[in-house]
Image (spheres, grey):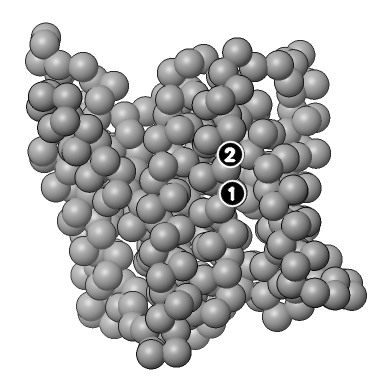
Amino acid sequence: MLGASLLFALMAACVKLASVHYGTGEIVLYRSLIGLVLMALALRTRGLTLRTPVPGMHFWRSVSGTVALVMWFYAVSVLPLGTAMTLNYTAPVWIALFLIGGSVMLGQAQVDGRLVATVLVGFAGVALVLRPTLEPQQLWGGLVGLLSGVLSAVAYLGVTALGRAGEPSERVVLYFSATGVLAGAGLALLEGPWHAHSVQGLLLLAAIGALATGAQWLMTRAYAAGATLGIATLQYLGIAYAFVLGVWLFDDPVTTQALAGMALIIGAGVAATLLRARPQRPDANPTET
């Protein structure tokens, strides 16, 4: 997840730059097409087939993930990068709420409250680092960005379920990429005439596709092998990466408030790791956290 968060932050910066040259649908299309080719090669290299025993699980994970991706790319194009990142990174909070709600409905209490607390502390750090503000004319983009966080949470839980079902990461990412190609092409047609390519534009598209595919593959392996809330908390470190990129590429100011937020994010990640490393009670199910 540490590697995935870094690649996602780099990808977001490239998306922001590419939005000057292309529409949201085109960026989603090219990003997904590159991922589709790379994952097809990875499947072939490993000798794996496209056939899956759980097509329904792939369908819901791919649809929710693709819609979340489209919404996030749109939010990045119309909002300040920090604001769009913050809204998308509400996903771990939604995951915590989904898991807690599910436990309550099933009459169970297997979610570690301390781990949930680390997720909330991590989000407090996100707010301090990025200090999101929305102007009245940006409310629609803000709503789209928030919904991308909700759907991302649904997609991440789907990734976890597929990992427990024994599905290889490459196949999960391949079906997700294929769905993105279809959605991106459809949205690009609705948006209007396709934009002409330039050397800069092509380089940005290639970078987005490569970074996104690598990040998606690492994230899929992380959620498949790790505890959901613990991995979700470590995902917050992507905000620290984004902060550094913002200072470097966009001359974002360095403030005491932002540094305090980074400390909270890193502290939440360390706390989650320590909590996951502790022995579980005999009657507890470790996969629930």
Q: Residue at x 75, y 57 (%)?
A: 186
Q: Are marks 2 and 1 in contact (CB under 8 Å)?
A: yes
Q: In this rendering, does residue 157 appear at all?
A: yes
Q: Mark 2 highlights which residue?
A: 62
Decide if residue 224 is on the left or right side of residue 93: right
Q: Residue at x 54, y 79 (%)?
A: 78
Q: How many marks?
A: 2
Decide if residue 129 is on the left or right side of residue 55: left
Near-viewer residue (280 or 31): 31
The amino acid on which the numbered mark 1 sits, given as a three-letter code, is Thr
Q: In this rendering, does residue 46 appear at all?
A: no
Q: Mark 1 highlights which residue?
A: 66
Q: Position of residue 127 (x, y in %)?
A: 27, 70
Q: Quadrant of residue 193?
A: bottom right
Q: Quadrant of residue 185?
A: bottom right
State the SS at label 2: helix
The amino acid on which the numbered mark 2 sits, given as a three-letter code, is Ser
Single out the residue that lies furthest toward the top: 282
Q: Where is 135 relative to 80, above or below?
A: below
